[in-house]
Every structure is written in C-alpha cells, then in structure tokens.
Amino acid sequence: MRATISIALAIAGLIHLLPLTGVLGAARLEKLYGLSFADANLALLMRHRAVLFGLLGLLMITAAFKSELQLTAIIAGLVSVISFLWLASPAGDYSHHIARIVNADMIALACLVIASGAWVYSSSPKT
C-alpha cells in the first residue's frame, strides 16, 4: 500500500508541477493557457499561481517519500483539483488548453482518490 500511495502522490505532484514553467513570463503563460497575458498585473498573478502550484507539486512529491506528510499532501491536492473541476464544470465551453487542464486534473483526482484509499487502508488497525 505504501508504494501505491507514493506512486499516486508522485504522479499528482508531477501534474501540479507542469504550470510552474509559467513563472518564466507572459509568453510561457500564453503557451500554457492559450490566452493573452499582455496585462502585466494579470501576468504577475498567474506567475504567482505558477509558484503556488509548484509548491503544491513539491509537497506531493516529497510526501511520496515521507509518510508523515502524506495526509496533508492528499488533502491539499484534493482541495486543489476538486475546486478547479467544480469551478470548470458549469463553464463547459472552454478552450482546448483549458480542456487539457481539466483532463490533467481528472487524472490527478484519480491518483489522489487511489492514494486516499490506500492511505486509509494502510492506516487502519489490522486485526
């Protein structure tokens, strides 16, 4: 079970690291999201968002190797992907760039659900 948790967290963590390249500037953000980031204020906010996703991804990858961080990483990851999917669901008519993010978050959600189940199973007292 520990290997299942670690693999699932590592995959979800890698997915969350992908937006980190947005920290490099507006041009990279435009490639990631297919939107214009000509407004310096919007680019700044999105670059900061990239840093936060990087931190979350690093937490999940670190938790893959440190069991004491696993529950925190699972909860943080679930909050991230569920909130995005919840916000994206009523929109429905988004670009292929955003659809790609939705699909990646669905994969991350599956990994985190697997990690959650494995964590609960491995943490429950055995008789």
Image: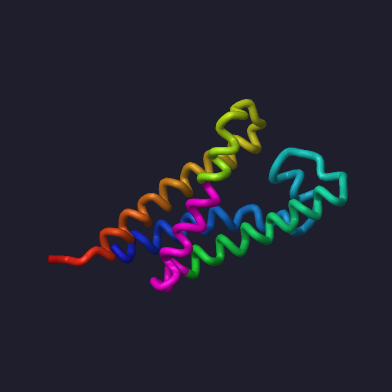
Instruction: Give me the residue at 63% from left, 26% from top.
Output: 93
Magenta-drawn segment:
63-81
Q: Is residue 64 magenta?
A: yes
- For this orientation, the residue located farthest to the top is 93
Q: Is residue 86 above or below residue 43?
A: above
Q: Is residue 30 left or right of residue 121?
A: right
Q: Position of residue 116 (x, y in %)?
A: 36, 55
Q: Is residue 82 above or below residue 77?
A: above
Q: Position of residue 13 (x, y in %)?
A: 51, 59
- The front one of 112 and 123 is 123
Q: Quadrant for the N terminus, please.
A: bottom left
Q: Position of residue 92 (x, y in %)?
A: 59, 27
Q: Quadrant for the C terminus, please.
A: bottom left
Q: Is residue 73 magenta?
A: yes
Q: Is residue 106 above or below residue 70?
A: above
Instruction: Give me the residue at 69% from left, 55% from top.
Output: 49
Instruction: Give me the residue at 33% from left, 64% from top.
Output: 3
- The prevailing secondary structure element of the residues shown in magenta is helix
Q: How many marks?
A: 0
Instruction: Give me the residue at 64% from left, 33% from top.
Output: 96
Q: How is the image coloured?
A: rainbow
- For this orientation, the residue located farthest to the right is 39
Q: Position of residue 118 (x, y in %)?
A: 31, 58
- The front one of 3 and 120 is 120
